[in-house]
Amino acid sequence: MNCEQIALLLSDYLHEGLNSEQSEEVQQHCERCGDCAQDVAMWKKLALLPAEQPSPESRARFEAMLHAYPSATAAEQTIPDTGRGASRWAFFEWLRSSLGAAAWSVALLVVGVFIGSRFNSSTPSHPEELTAMHAEMTSMRQLVALSMLQQQSASERLQGVSWSGREAQLDPQVQAALMRTLRNDGSVDVRLAALDALSRHGSQPQIRKGVVDALQEQQSPLVQVALIDQLAEWRDPDAAQRLRNFQQTANLNPAVRQRAEWAISKLQ
Amino acid sequence: MLHVRNGEVGLLGVLFDRYQTPLYNFYTKMTQDRAVSEDLVQEVFLRILRYRQSYRPGTSFRTWMYQIARNTRFDQVRKTHPETPFASEPVASASLSDSVQQLQEAAMLQRALMQLPEDKRELLVLSRFQELKYDEIARLLGCEVGAVKVRVHRALQQLREIFQQLEGGGPASGLDRAMGDALPPTRRLQ
């Protein structure tokens, strides 16, 4: 058989859908033909990509959705196109979301400031007014961040973390919310993003303490390593003893234990 | 699904338990973003509930579900493309217990997969990881089974080219090693 003939069989061969005689032919061909052999190897190599597990909160979100789904809409569900039509309203749905609302608020504020400055260009702007406006915007952003951190969707919570990290000075409420997120959020990505947002405020001792405390509660090796790296970067001498205690934790991932050792040596 | 269609929506939980992990893996391999993938899975089940009357009894639920999954992904790409504002943790680097070399190869594979055109990536993910049969994929894509086989083969060839480029231009240094692996052509569960 030549490569063209083999190409017709190869897809079935990869799915183990050939009889033994045909499989034998493909194997013999692959022993002679590097190109076809590499296609088979590539297929096998794809097994390296890991199978992922959704987070435990996924089931809870589904339950909440099922519970909230109004039975009154049951009779209306006869749309035949399996859902693509719904996307026509996606734009409006976005406007109704908390991010959309925030974007509208900011846009309206900017338009207001622009119109105000155009009509009052003869009067010099007062620095205190600007400061007040800036403070108002800051507080609005913080409000949006706090609201988004409580969303069910992990990607919305990620956006909430991103919004909260934009201020030079963390509001105590936002800081507490970020700490809660770092300790308790169900998504590894969101916890890592919260750590990233907090890492910019390492000069505050209470944040450093919060991060050390969070280390004891984490189960995910990825988050544990990120926390250890952060503590090493801050060079907080108090963290060394806590890391030593942490190292004694039973069933600790060997890579995490090694990382903790490295961090302790760096802190001494 | 028939019970769900006939109003016993509580039974959707059985389908959720059976299919949430395969769907989640479909999306993580398509998007390389865990948070987005979880949201997409939720959206698929919401749509299943919303459009349950459009499921035709006697047809494959899995094929119907993947049709909804593809549409959901299509809508998501249309809403967010090309912006990807949050660099989520790459899915291939999840397990610290894997050897460094395996992690590197998996990351490179994921990169190569992401460089494939969307339709080819989808085809490979469906046939390789979702374990959909060629006739199921043909129904899903609305084409002949023969066409699916040819397209899977071409997608695989293109993936191999991209992977080799990423690997550094060598003809098959990593692939030769893979030939020696005793990995079965079904997906490996960790």
Image (spheres, coloured by chain):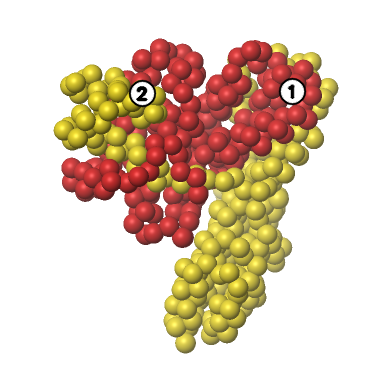
Q: Residue under circle 1?
A: B4
User: What residue is at 68 percent from the left and 20 percent from the top?
Assistant: B51
| Name of the residue lying farthest toward the right | A72
Residue A34 picture location, percent across and down: 18, 35
- Chain of the residue where label 2 is placed in the rendered structure: A
Q: Is residue B108 above or below residue A91?
A: below
Residue A63 picture location, percent across and down: 75, 39
For the residues labelled 2 and 1, the Cα–Cα distance comes to 37 Å
Q: Quadrant of residue B13?
A: top right
Label 1 element class: helix
Q: Residue under circle 2?
A: A18
Amino acid type at mark 1: Val
Q: Is residue A51 above or below residue A221?
A: above
Query: With B104 as the anchor, is A215 left or right in this view?
Result: right
Label 2 element class: loop
Q: How would you rate the neighbour count of disc 2 (Cα within 10 Å): few for under 14, some for 14-19, many for 20 or more?
A: some
Q: Nearer the viewer, mark 2 or mark 1?
A: 2
User: What residue is at 35 percent from the left and 39 percent from the top?
Assistant: A44
Residue closest to the eye, A210 or A74: A74
Q: Which chain is yellow?
A: A
Residue closest to the eye, A60 or B60: B60
- Chain of the residue where label 1 is placed in the rendered structure: B
Q: Quadrant of residue B155?
A: top left
Labels 2 and 1 within one chain:
no
Q: Which chain is red?
A: B
Residue A73 visible from this viewpoint: no
Q: Is residue A28 above or below residue A237?
A: above
